[in-house]
Image (cartoon, grey):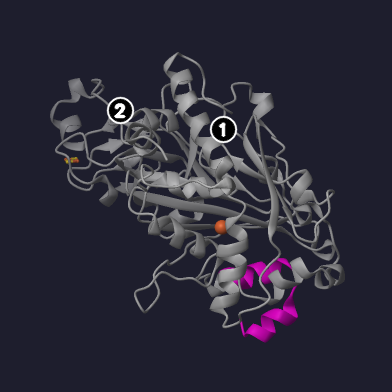
Amino acid sequence: MLSEEKNRLLTRVGPGEPMGDYLRRYWLPIAGAAELDANPVKPIRILGEDLVLYRDLSGTYGLTERNCLHRRADLSYGFVEKKGLRCNYHGWLFDEGGACIERPYDDLAHPQSRNAQLPCIKAYPVKELAGLLFAYMGPKPAPELSVYEPFTRTDGFAQVVTADIPCNWFQCQENSCDPVHFEWMHDNWSLRLAGKDAPYAAKHLRVAFDEFEHGFTYKRMREGATEDDPLWQVGRVTLWPIGFFLGQHFEWRVPVDDENTLSIAWFYMRVPEEQQPYVQKHVPAWKSPIVGPDGRWISTHVINQDIIAWVGQGAIADRTKEVLGASDRGISMIRKRFLDDLESVAAGNDPKGTIRDPEAAKCIPLPSGDSNADLSLSKDEMMRNPYFRARITQDFRWHAGQPKEVRKAFLEAMGAAEQIAKEGL
Ligand code: FES
Ligand SMILES: [Fe+2]
């Protein structure tokens, strides 16, 4: 159980709130780069601020406030130029730093004031990495963008999946440090959803949590496993501050505002040896639905199941009413770290896990007990390995609604022509 005050501190993210200011000190993923393919201008709301994300005609990304400096028109209806974003009302043009670099009529009428410095609109830097766009909305100088090792790989197929979640970010992130829910929410509930009632999955016998520079690891020992199981020895990563890393994929719970979260996930699978060397030309991005045709939450896919837990806890989970159990030790640990770190940052320190040394940020290894992530296999070996075989022969398991063209591109990358024919793609 938490006090009202601590619940508030952990959850509120608008400008001026301690947690909002804290999270602004990190580069946060805000979109898949491919989301700007069809329309290069996208309205977006992050940390309680309405913004516009765009890619201009020379490929530079910008993230600015939503309303124009002139008379406050909506810049998400603006259009991109070789440099910057132009307002569709009177044509004022803004560069990626937010400076107004053209006022077409004023520049003509008052050529002498052409170069006059105007106040800028608010703008935040954006960087592209591995098909994702990251933004930094905090005080300058920005720390380095942390390049985790999987982002440096060039031998596989990546995809970005987003979902709009109508609840607070922190209850989503607590799920990243909660090993026992796998047994119930994913294993046993899926079994029951499939109309079966036995056998229930292997029980969790022990769980352990450790802190390290980039977050926490959680470890699990389930019935039938031995001490040398990588999920007990190494575990999985609660990636600081809003992420989750499971070897072949990352998930982030990006705060939109106090009652909405943008889920962004990045999935990667190495292609078989016969397909190497392989360079993915385009990392697709797609949005997963969370509501089914019956108006109920979709429960067929892993992250959709998680989402049901998160939204079920309420718009902002009321932690003054909870009753924590023995499985929640990791959750207590991350709450304490956040609360301690808020104080540490108020005292002038950098927050946990931020990196200032460019060399150190270039390729950050993360622990992973998901040993499949590092295997290099031939096609035959993949088809004999239950993990890879399932990914090739079955529907995308993490999120509902994978578009056919993404499924096809994935199977092409895997050299799975037979499967493409079988699915009629
Ligand atoms: S309101 Fe944007 S140019 Fe006039
Ligand atoms: Fe889960």
Residue 21 counted in the magenta span: no
Q: Residue at x 58, y 72 (%)?
A: 190
Q: Which amino acid does label 2 sit on?
A: Gly
Q: Which residue is drawn at 26% across and 22% down?
A: 115
Marks 1/2: CA–CA distance? 23 Å
Magenta span: predominant SS is: helix
The x and y percentages for residue 329 are 58, 41
Mark positioned earlier in the residue sequence (1 or 2): 2
Ligand 2 location (quadrant): bottom right
Q: Which amino acid does label 1 sit on?
A: Leu
Residue 176 or 142: which is nearer the viewer? Answer: 176
Secondary element at image label 1: loop
Location of residue 390 with respect to 111 vertically, above or below: below
Question: How busy is the neighbourhood of tag 1: few (under 14 within 10 Å), some, or many (20 plus)?
Answer: many
Residue 275 or 272: which is nearer the viewer? Answer: 272
Magenta stretch, residue numbers = 406-425
Q: Which residue is drawn at 62% across and 67% down?
A: 187
The mark found on residue 16 in the picture is 2
Which quadrant does the N terminus fall into? top left
Which residue is disc 1 drawn over?
145
Q: In this view, does 274 lie to the left or right of 137?
A: right
Mark 2 residue's CB less than 8 Å from ligand 1: no
Residue 110 or 423: which is nearer the viewer? Answer: 423
Dividing the picture into quarters, in which one does residue 417 lie?
A: bottom right
Residue 408 counted in the magenta span: yes
